[in-house]
């Protein structure tokens, strides 16, 4: 029975060592998972910041396009006004000349 007891102790020792080894491996994997989670959260936060910046830039671009359209309309109105003013001026000169003669 001493032999059986020694065998049993030997099996128990192997099992205890295997369990300890598995516990160490489990702790390593848990640490890796925690690190990966933290990295993922940091990346999500960074991506969120980029999304906000992209949205801001898109809004700025849209504002700039609207200002451009307004300026083009204004330029067109000024051009039309200048042409009209030039025509009126020419017409006044022609009328004065006709009146003088």
Image (tube, rainbow, N blue to C red):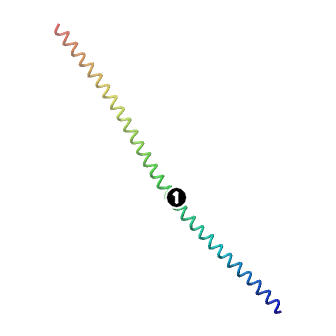
Looking at the image, residue 4 sits to the left or right of residue 101; the answer is right
User: Which quadrant of the figure has residue 70?
Assistant: top left
Does 85 sit above or below residue 64? above
Expressed as whole percent of the image width and height from the top left, the position of residue 81 reads 29, 25
Q: Is residue 22 above or below residue 42?
A: below
Q: Is residue 38 left or right of residue 87?
A: right
- Residue 39 in percent (x, y) is at 54, 62
Q: Quadrant of residue 15?
A: bottom right
Q: Residue at x 64, y 73 (%)?
A: 26
**Furthest residue to the left?**
100
How many labels sit on residues?
1
In this rendering, the answer to whether 23 lies above or below 69 is: below
**Quadrant assignment for the C terminus:** top left
* Residue for badge 1: 44
In the rendering, at what x and y percent does residue 3 appear?
82, 90
Q: Is residue 29 left or right of residue 91?
A: right
- Classify 10 Å Cα crowding around label 1: few (below 14), some (14-19), many (20 and above): few
């Amino acid at each position: 029975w001493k032999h059986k007891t020694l065998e049993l102790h030997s099996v128990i020792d192997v099992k205890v060592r295997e369990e300890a080894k598995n516990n160490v491996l489990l702790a390593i994997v848990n640490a890796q998972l925690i690190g990966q989670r933290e990295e993922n959260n940091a990346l999500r936060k960074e991506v969120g910041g980029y999304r906000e910046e992209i949205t801001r830039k898109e809004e700025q671009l849209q504002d700039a396009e609207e200002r451009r359209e307004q300026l083009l309309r204004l330029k067109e109105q000024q051009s039309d006004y200048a042409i009209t003013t030039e025509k009126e001026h020419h017409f006044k000169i022609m009328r004065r000349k006709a009146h003088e003669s």
